[in-house]
Amino acid sequence: MEKLDVFRDYIQRIDVLIVDKNPSSRSRLLKIMYDLGCKRNKIFTAGEMSEAEELIATKNIGIVLSDYFIGGGSGFDLFKVVREKFPDKKELSLILVTSNISQTAVAKAAEEDVDSFIIKPYTIQSIQENLISTVSHKVKPSEYIKLIDQAKELITQRKLDEAIVVLNEAKKLHQKPALALFYIGQAEYMKEAIEQAKGSYSSGLAFNNIHYKCLLGLYEMFLEQKKYSEAYQVVKKIAKFFPANPDRLAQIVRLAVQTENYDDMQMYYEIFTSLDERTEQMVNYIGAGLFVSGKHKLINKKIDEAIRLFDNIAVSCSEFSKFTRAMICALVDYDQVASAEKYLSRFPPGSDDQEDFLVSEYIIMSRKGEQHSHLAKFGLDLYNKNIRDPECMKLMIQAMEACQYKKETIENFKSEFLKLWPEEASFRVA
């Protein structure tokens, strides 16, 4: 049977889903599917993730054409939902549509997560040829893919040695059998043959050095073994070549800090700003990563680099006033008072009576030559507002000593200070 006949037979039996934020793009793809023989009542369109999920729940989806950037997620997120809804539908065809040429590598490397990709702008002829070829190969797969599917089933049944035999046969049928090597690695890892699994993943990467599944297999293996430096080098490559979702990016940022790869944080910030959806958790992670990296730069007297990282926090994480407070305190500690002062204006509106703003203001005041009497009074005001910050309380006590407050009063405050922060044992009653 010819490819076109296979394609037309298939589209009579399934529904097609087109997902794109742009209405004109949706309409164009719809017309292309219609011209190829798909019935109009079997083509469904959506502009964002939530609409698409509703259709996936009720329709017999067999082909998905999705732009990478969709409201509420990405094309990859959508494909994951479709696969979870139809886990046994091997003929399912998931096709990524993108205007970003770098994502061609994404589609190739992902292999199973994306069945094909279409680069915008496309011609009608090119997209028709792509669709017919992709769908016909899914409906009538090659012997290579059939053997991989057979091996996957054996792996699910934990018949690991049998799976490896099948996958070694599959390797002979493909010039670049990275996918077969990935599954060999999976089976070997499940057998706890760690070095063999590492070798199989690496062999797969020798054929395709950005093969998504082989990279992910290595990353997860290193992470489980607590080989954090090795895991980081792999996941950094994943971040470079593959569009990051918030969960994965949060993991990468945390691992970058854990392995002290502070110089990479600017790259992750730029990835973060490219995300359509930024969860509160993701903002928190990127803010923490930028702050730790910025403080490391301060310690190493790389002031301009620290300020650049802190400026990123001020732009993208300002709703978390804890970061602004931490930046101000760090800058003051390293005698960058003028730089610290400019961040006072980055607190959210209405923060003037909030703890983070008041603490920050007080710490800046203490370094600007403010009179001891004023510092003592301001510190007492903070104390009476039930604000307990070690640096503020220390500054208040020192100002009281300079103003010759009653010794008993000062001793009482010092005693409370040491109860609250016993690790500050060097701060003793004079």
Image: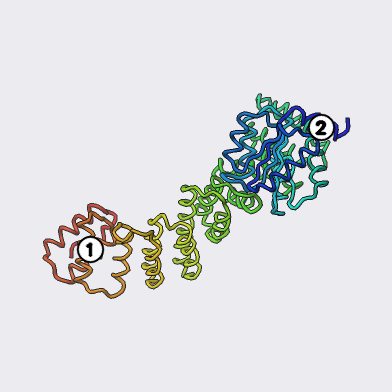
Q: Residue at x 45, y 54 (%)?
A: 288
Q: Can residue 203 be seen at all in this image of the molecule?
A: no
Which mark identifies residue 317?
none
Quadrant containing the N terminus in the rendered view = top right
Q: Residue 147 vs residue 361: left or right?
A: right
Q: Position of residue 137 (x, y in %)?
A: 80, 35
Q: Image height check: is 244 above or below 170? A: below
Which mark identifies residue 8?
2
Rendered image quadrant of residue 384:
bottom left
Rendered image quadrant of residue 9:
top right
Q: Secondary structure at mark 2?
A: helix
Which mark identifies residue 379?
1
Q: Secondary structure at mark 1?
A: helix
Q: Residue 384 vs residue 261: left or right?
A: left
Residue flagged by tag 2: what amino acid is it?
Answer: Arg
Q: Position of residue 347 (x, y in %)?
A: 38, 61
